[in-house]
């Protein structure tokens, strides 16, 4: 409710305002006293000042608004009481705005005429240096806001280390300039499309396929064009980057920073209701992101990048995030696009099908042996050049073409293997030639494993499977390379129909199932058939090496005596049964 209106001829002394005609609002933000006591009318008048005193007209901040330090009110509130003996001439309807000397020197805040701006060190003097008068015609409303600014509240609730350019993620991985170019072009084309029925894109691929690298490169391109609304890079087990409840407050905080109009709207929402940061994710999305974007003219399409959704701390929160986004994009068109990257976990795939029902785009990270070869050749050339002291006698090109070919095949067309190789060979404390010998197996590794990062990835994924013993038995069959279908594996191991699929439900980032003929299809990555006649294939050739190396696989080592004995026993039982049974048509090898 306005405290005073129709104050034509209104005058303020002691501010830095612009001449304004028409309706006007005066903001006094951060006051910690009752609004009615801030302005007293009748025979006396006082105005108390908080952090910001500024003029607004038609919802726009005046270009010369007075700024004071954030903690000014708390530090100087006892110094801001103006004398209560100022007369007010009711015939002129004038409110006089002034302050006492905060230092008790007897000089007014306006200065004594002998001090220059550079001499004024106290922020109070700097704020009051050049007072001006303003005459306003029209209606005037007094608006006061209380408590902490909304942007400060959001900042505390945000996971700033999840930003694409956070210091914690330095150095951020990026695509090699000559790799994944077609995929990045397709992503840019999607982000610029005005078809609001495709406001969400799901980029999926197996573990180590390079999803985060692509997301990072996409963020860099969006940011260069001022179209990156927000980014969140999840990390499993991290106290803030693994917390799905921090996603939307983090997005809202970044969104407020990228657009001045959104900053005002989002900050005001949080100031009015600070509890919004702890409400349900669907409420946060609607109140902090969707509604401000619908009510504000942005003028361009902004993109929210969410990487590694599968590394969020809870599957239920992962589902809730997708459900909330699905509900939002089904309503009125938004100037927003949602980019989500994750492994092809079943619960995420099901959530996309249920939450979006065909109103999203999908992109699979397919194998790219050509990109792998380009990356290896460029990186080996760089290592040869930078390790000039230890590589001076090594002829170039290095290594030999057959070594590069072997590494390309080992990579299975994904970057996780070759990036691990390059990191190991590039160690400045060792000779690159000796380190490469460890990679190709012509020299025994020392205490340090060349594939430590890769082994950690495989171990982390396998450890999430609760049926450990059954998983180990099935993996033993796979590493034996018997070429059995899913149905035959279940019969061989004495499992119930469907047990293989249930056991591998959390391993879709490492394995895929399908009919053998599907392997020759161009879009093999999108095939996923777990029927009894399908076979299981590993995404990474290096996964075989991991499972058969006791130092790397440890509890998941499949070539141990107990595993081989169990498999041999099962095979003998099958052949014994076939030789004595008259009905063998149900078991075809």
Image: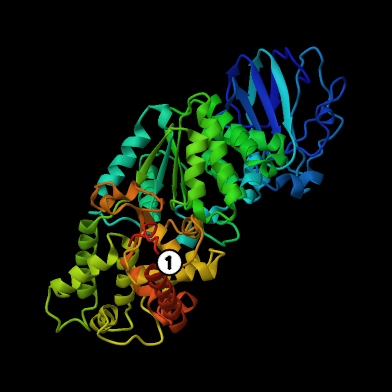
371 relative to 17, above or below: below
Residue in view at x 31 percent, y 55 percent = 175
Q: Residue at x 48, y 28 (%)?
A: 334
Residue 418 placement: quadrant: bottom left
The spot of residue 411 in percent (x, y) is 28, 65
> What scheme was used to colour the molecule?
rainbow
Instruction: Pick whichever, 140 or 206, lies toward us.
Output: 206
| Residue 205 image position (x, y, % from top left) | 38, 52
Against 464, residue 84 (above or below) is above
The local crowd at label 1, few if under 14, some if 14 to 19, many if 20 or more residues have their Cα within 10 Å, is many
Between residue 459 and residue 575, name the one nearer to us. 575
Side of 289 where 371 appears, left or right: left
Q: Is residue 134 above or below residue 504?
A: above
Badge 1 is on which residue?
A: 492
Quarter in which the N terminus is drawn: top right
**x and y percentages locating residue 417 in the rendered image:** 32, 67
**Residue 559, can we see it?**
yes
Tag 1 secondary structure: helix
The answer to whether 241 appears left or right of 373 in the picture is: right
Q: Judge left or right: residue 117 versus residue 274.
A: left
Residue 435: percent from the left, percent from the top?
Answer: 28, 81
Regarding residue 453, the answer to whether it shows in the image is no
Closest to the observer, 218 or 345:
345
């Amino acid at each position: 409710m306005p405290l005073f209106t129709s104050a034509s001829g209104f005058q303020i002394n002691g501010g830095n305002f612009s001449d304004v005609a028409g309706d006007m609002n005066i903001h006094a933000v951060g006051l910690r006293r009752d609004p009615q006591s801030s302005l007293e009318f009748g025979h006396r008048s006082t105005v108390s000042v908080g952090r910001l005193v500024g003029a607004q007209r038609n919802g726009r901040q005046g270009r010369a608004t007075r700024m004071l330090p954030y903690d000014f009110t708390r530090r100087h509130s006892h110094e801001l009481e103006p004398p209560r003996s100022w007369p007010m001439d009711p015939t002129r309807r004038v409110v006089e705005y002034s302050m006492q000397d905060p230092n008790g020197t007897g000089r007014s805040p306006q200065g004594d005429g002998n001090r220059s701006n550079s001499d004024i060190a106290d922020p109070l003097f700097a704020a009051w240096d050049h007072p001006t008068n303003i005459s306003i015609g029209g209606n005037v409303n007094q608006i006061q806001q209380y408590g902490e600014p909304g942007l400060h509240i959001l900042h505390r609730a945000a996971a700033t280390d999840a930003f694409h350019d956070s210091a914690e993620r330095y150095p951020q991985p990026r695509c090699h300039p000559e790799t994944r170019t077609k995929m990045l072009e397709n992503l840019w084309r999607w982000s610029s499309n005005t078809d609001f029925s495709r406001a969400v894109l799901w980029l999926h691929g197996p573990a180590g396929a390079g999803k985060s690298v692509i997301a990072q490169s996409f963020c860099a391109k969006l940011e260069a064009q001022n179209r990156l609304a927000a980014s969140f890079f999840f990390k499993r087990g991290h106290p803030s980057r693994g917390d799905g409840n921090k996603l939307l407050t983090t997005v809202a905080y970044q969104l407020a920073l990228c657009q001045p109009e959104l900053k005002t709207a989002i900050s005001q929402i949080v100031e009015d209701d600070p509890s919004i940061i702890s409400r349900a994710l669907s409420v946060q999305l609607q109140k902090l992101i969707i509604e401000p974007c619908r009510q504000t003219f942005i003028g361009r399409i902004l993109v929210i990048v969410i990487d590694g959704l599968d590394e969020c701390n809870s599957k239920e929160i992962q589902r809730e995030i997708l459900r909330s986004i699905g509900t939002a994009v089904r309503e009125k068109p938004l100037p927003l696009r949602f980019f989500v990257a994750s492994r092809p976990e079943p619960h995420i795939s099901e959530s996309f099908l249920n939450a979006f029902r065909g109103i999203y785009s999908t992109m699979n990270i397919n194998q790219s042996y050509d990109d792998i070869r380009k990356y290896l050749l460029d990186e080996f050339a760089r290592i040869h050049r930078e390790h000039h002291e230890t590589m001076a006698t090594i002829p170039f090109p290095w290594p030999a073409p057959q070594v590069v070919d072997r590494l390309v095949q080992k990579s299975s067309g994904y970057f996780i293997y070759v990036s691990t190789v390059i990191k190991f060979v590039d160690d400045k404390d060792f000779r690159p030639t000796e380190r490469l010998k460890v990679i190709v197996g012509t020299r025994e590794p020392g205490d340090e494993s060349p594939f430590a990062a890769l082994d950690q990835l495989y171990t982390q994924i396998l450890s999430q499977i609760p049926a450990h013993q059954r998983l180990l038995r099935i993996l033993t069959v796979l590493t034996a390379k018997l070429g059995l279908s899913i149905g035959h594996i279940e019969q061989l191991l004495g499992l119930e129909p469907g047990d293989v699929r249930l056991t591998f439900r959390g391993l879709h980032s490492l394995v895929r199932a399908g009919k053998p003929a599907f392997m020759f299809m161009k879009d093999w990555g999108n095939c996923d058939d777990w029927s009894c006649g399908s076979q299981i294939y590993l995404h990474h050739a290096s996964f075989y090496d991991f499972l058969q190396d006791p130092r790397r696989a440890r509890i998941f080592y499949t070539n141990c005596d107990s595993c081989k004995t169990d498999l041999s026993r099962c095979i003998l039982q099958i052949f014994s049964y076939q030789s004595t049974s008259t009905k063998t048509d149900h078991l075809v090898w």
